[in-house]
Amino acid sequence: MVKILNRKKLVPNIHMIEISAPDVVEKCQPGQFVMLMPDKKGERIPLSLADWDKDKGSITCVFMAVGTSTQKLTRLNQGDEIPVCVGPLGKPAEIDKFGTVLCAAGCYGIGAIYPIARALKKAGNTVMTLIDAKAKYLIYWEDRFKKISEKYFVSARDGFYDCKDYIPKVLKDVLEENPIDRVVSIGCTYLMYTCSEATKHLNIDTYVNLNPLMVDGTGMCGACRLRVGKGTKFACVDGPEFDGHEVDWNELFYRRKSYFDDEIRSMCYWERTKKQRK
Amino acid sequence: MGEDKKKLSPELKEVLKKAFNEEWRKELRKSISAKERMKLSRQNMPEREPFERNKDFEEVNLGLDQEKAVKEAQRCLDCANPQCVMGCPVGIDIPSFIKLIEKRKFLESAQKIKETNALPAVCGRVCPQETQCEELCNLNKATGSPVAIGNLERFVSDYEREQGKVHIPKLPASTGRKVAVIGSGPGGLTVAGELARKGHQVTVFEALHVPGGVLAYGIPEFRLPNYILDAEVSYLKNLGVEFRMNFVVGMIRSIQDLKKEGYEAIYIGTGAGLPNFMGLPGENLIGIYSANEYLTRVNLMRADLFPEYDTPVFLGKKAVVLGGGNVAMDSVRTAQRLGADEATIVYRRSRKEMPARVEEVHHAEQEGIQFHFLTNPVRYISDEHNRVKAMECIQMELGEPDSSGRRRPIPIKGSEFIMEVDLVVVSIGNSPNPLIGKVTPGLEIGKWGNVEVHWDTMATSLDGVYAGGDIVRGGATVILAMGDARVAAREMHQYLSS
Ligand SMILES: Cc1cc2nc3c(=O)[nH]c(=O)nc-3n(C[C@H](O)[C@H](O)[C@H](O)COP(=O)(O)OP(=O)(O)OC[C@H]3O[C@@H](n4cnc5c(N)ncnc54)[C@H](O)[C@@H]3O)c2cc1C
Ligand SMILES: Cc1cc2nc3c(=O)[nH]c(=O)nc-3n(C[C@H](O)[C@H](O)[C@H](O)COP(=O)(O)OP(=O)(O)OC[C@H]3O[C@@H](n4cnc5c(N)ncnc54)[C@H](O)[C@@H]3O)c2cc1C
Ligand code: SF4
Ligand code: SF4
Ligand code: FES
């Protein structure tokens, strides 16, 4: 069993969870993920590493509560245990000296991109950050990003920031006004797709951390397969970072939705039975 | 890939001869003449009614009872030259365990098997006996109906477990030497058992959260119930084997790290877990699974019990499984049990070339599975939600034999036709797991991605590192993996002792 050291809500619907995982910490690198199971009857789900503490032997993930597994995670507290947390899995993000890198993130991706942004900064890049959120109150870890970013942008729809536009517009302006050599993007599929589309005609290298459904996370099942360029790739071992200009987005959108009805059934079942269980 | 070891070692010959000459064996042989024994007919394994069992995941075979087992044991001629043993990759002293059954010494019989096979309840269920021990049985040559060695093996090991009298052998004093076993498939479990019994300190590292490899995530409950595997694993725990689950060697620790941590001998038993696809247009449509994913969702994650368990699986109405091996049979029978109106095998060669075990094909047919032979898919057709709704197939004919000795299927021009489907399971084989090969400098990898070994010792190109089973052979069998494991364990013990 794996111990939960901390779990707290960062903003509505998005939580961070800190897990004691000394085996994971030793080798983990930015861009990698873990597979975890919230309880014995749960699913194995992938979560990106948002931070880690070598001395404490702990890792931190940020997750959005969207379905049964993530809802179950929101109910965990310090001292609780979960049966499975395995990792680090997947290839690390490519970290090199690229010049100026724009890190564009939304929802859970704000957490997931943080170690990549930090490593890029450390590797000598000029880091710029673009956070996408519906409204100010959904933004977290702002101070962390401000510390490592040369420039910090937000695209939000609530008028608090000086922008009323959705990410495509803000991104376009950012790309026009700044000498960006590379874009890295993590968040919902739509955000990653939008970023990739925006940079395509500008020929700016754009890398995305894809989030297809997974089962084992070790390359054994092919659940996470998707078309990238000419071939089919397994996101858990060939990725999760891929060239955004090569991804077959349409396929990914559909594959991610493939169990929609079941997910709702699962949620309803859990809602109905959780009281008896706890 | 692979090599069959159909030779008896001098030591084994000696063991067999000694047992053969024991007084009680002589008497037992005399008690019924060989002629009489040959007249007895083979005891059938009782099984559940096909149309009852094809709706649930309970075991299909029910096992022999004591009377049937003793009767079957009487058929064994207790040959001076027991050919059967040559067919068993782990070299079980088959006549001894069978004669102990005839004497009704069931517990002793179970222990006899465990001297060389740590997983008898598994092997008794899934070994392809008809092409291993039973094929070579002298009675098979004489009458065409071999002794039911596998069924007897299953009987005694079930008996032992059900009596709750599992015998834990006395262990020698600890040698203090650390051994790492990577992968908890049948190969890894065998190495672990053998070396623990020699007093070494064994740790099994497993990537998944349940031990057993294919036995756990692949082979369905109706052929190999989980509690059987659990019992075999807890036997190993009782021998002092430590299991580290959720531990992916290559990601969490490298082989070099394990060596640094004091593991002197290492066994790689990571299996053939990489599913092959055909590369057809539309293969990534929703509703198309690899057999690994499909079976893992059901066997490991219990999607059959969704929504009590959280992992879902598509329940096809028109389910098609591509392939002709054991994996394909397991998948198609699973689809039927999950409620498919039609569950069909599509196989590009003819019935004769199917690699699946005869018993499995027979069971599938009884249960109402349909077979489309000499048929191959060409592309998949999707509905408006990117979900598979049909499959274009082409008819095949058989040409000259290929390198595997089977006749090569050739497409017949113009024979394309459309088949409606809503669930496809691609079951055309698995390749060796590439991870460890990729991250271990100096480990020699063959052209199929397999780890290269010296077949007499199962030693890899790295000192102290051994390998066996599917990672070396590609998709093979449980018992071949265990045979490799025994050779490796013997060598690893020597390596540790020198
Ligand atoms: C490599 C990798 C890393 C990931 N890292 C993270 C991470 O750090 N934090 C995180 O929250 N998620 C992450 N995800 C996604 C995460 O695995 C899923 O959110 C999770 O499996 C959902 O499980 P569930 O049972 O709660 O929801 P389900 O019941 O499986 O899904 C409910 C519905 O929500 C949709 N959905 C699921 N996830 C998301 C999402 N992230 N955004 C928008 N809609 C979604 C689904 O398509 C589905 O329709 C990652 C995925 C991958 C492949
Ligand atoms: C559905 C199905 C049905 C079958 N039916 C039969 C049958 O009836 N009879 C028969 O004889 N054979 C059958 N087989 C074949 C048989 O199961 C295999 O040949 C056998 O299991 C191989 O054993 P193994 O020890 O080499 O590895 P596996 O059983 O493949 O186990 C390998 C284990 O290693 C783990 N692993 C992989 N990589 C790592 C890593 N890096 N770190 C840690 N752990 C790792 C895997 O998770 C897995 O648990 C079947 C196979 C399948 C898939
Ligand atoms: S282990 Fe398999 S091959 Fe060996 S005797 Fe038993 S059934 Fe036959
Ligand atoms: S060859 Fe057949 S008859 Fe002879 S000892 Fe073996 S099982 Fe018995
Ligand atoms: S999740 Fe199974 S292969 Fe990637």
Image (tube, rainbow, N blue to C red):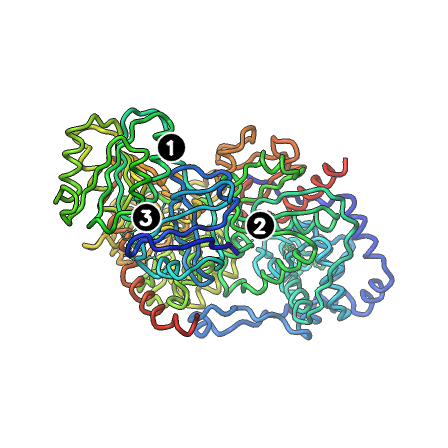
Taking A235 as reference, is B132 left or right? Answer: right
Q: Find residue B377 and report its horizontal and vertical position in percent.
A: 31, 49
Q: CA distance from mark 3 to mark 2?
A: 28 Å
| Image quadrant containing the N terminus of chain B | top right
Q: Is mark 3 within 8 Å of ligand 1?
A: yes
Relative to B382, is A169 on the left or the right? left
Tell me where residue A134 appears, x and y as whole percent: 20, 50
Query: Where's residue B164, x and y in %?
Result: 68, 70
Residue type, numbered disc 2: Arg
Q: Can you say whether B85 is above or below A232 in the image?
A: below
Q: Which mark is residue A212?
A: 3
Does label 1 point to a residue whose CB lies under 8 Å from ligand 1? no
Q: Which residue is mark 1?
A: A119
Tell me the kind of residue under disc 3: Pro
Distance (Cα) linking label 3 and label 1: 25 Å
Q: Amino acid at mark 1?
A: Ala
Can you tell which quarter of the image residue B399 is in? top left
Chain bearing mark 3 = A
Residue A187's quadrant in the figure? Answer: top left
Tell me the CA gap for discs 2 and 1: 31 Å
Marks 2,1: beta carbons within 8 A: no
Q: Earlier in the sequence, mark 3 or mark 1?
A: 1
Residue pointed to by mark 2: B244
Looking at the image, the residue that sits furthest to the right is: B23
